[in-house]
């Protein structure tokens, strides 16, 4: 049976938590995605270089850079079923739509700063 796993983590703008999340998720550079192993990472405060999320080689990254640094991203290995809804995205909010099995899902990742 197909299994969808969604992991969420604040990466504190650092590569070490990024590498730990990839290891925990079981992402391997040599592993091909299958429907039975669909994993989506919802992250906040990702490591940024030149206004792009880095540290996730060969993965699809959904984020939006407008006028402020990217603080939210959704990352997946299987990009064929994911559509970023750009009209709802900001540097702090990412919204994607995906199909998993016979279900249509809308996933949101929001960065909310404590006052």
Image: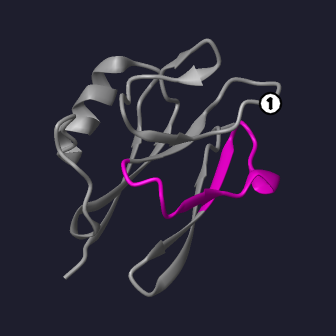
Indicate yes or no whether the magenta region holds residue 21. no
The kind of secondary structure element at disc 1 is loop
Q: Quadrant of the N terminus?
A: bottom left
Looking at the image, which residue sits at the far bottom? 102
Q: Residue at x 48, y 21 (%)?
A: 47
Q: Residue at x 27, y 37 (%)?
A: 21
Left or right of residue 99: residue 24 = left
The foreground one among 52 and 113 is 52
Left or right of residue 96: residue 8 = left
Indicate yes or no whether the magenta region holds residue 88. yes
Q: Which residue is mark 1?
A: 66
Q: Position of residue 3 (x, y in %)?
A: 25, 73
Q: Position of residue 112 (x, y in %)?
A: 64, 44
Q: Residue at x 47, y 84 (%)?
A: 103
Q: Position of residue 52 (x, y in %)?
A: 59, 23
Q: Residue at x 64, y 29 (%)?
A: 70
Region of the chain picked out in magenta, as a range = 77-96
Q: Quadrant of the C terminus?
A: top right
Q: Say if 69 sits above or below 110 in the image.
A: above
The foreground one among 65 and 114 is 65
């Amino acid at each position: 049976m197909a299994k969808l796993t969604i992991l969420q983590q604040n990466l504190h703008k650092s590569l070490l938590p990024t590498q730990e999340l990839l290891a925990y998720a079981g992402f391997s550079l040599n592993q091909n995605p299958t429907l039975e192993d669909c994993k989506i990472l919802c992250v906040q405060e990702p490591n940024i270089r030149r206004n792009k999320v880095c540290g996730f080689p060969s993965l699809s990254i959904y984020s939006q850079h407008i006028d402020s640094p990217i603080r939210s991203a959704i990352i997946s290995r299987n990009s064929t079923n994911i559509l970023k809804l750009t009209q709802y995205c900001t540097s702090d909010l990412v919204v994607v739509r995906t199909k998993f099995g016979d279900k249509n899902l809308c996933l949101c990742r929001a960065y909310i700063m404590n006052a």
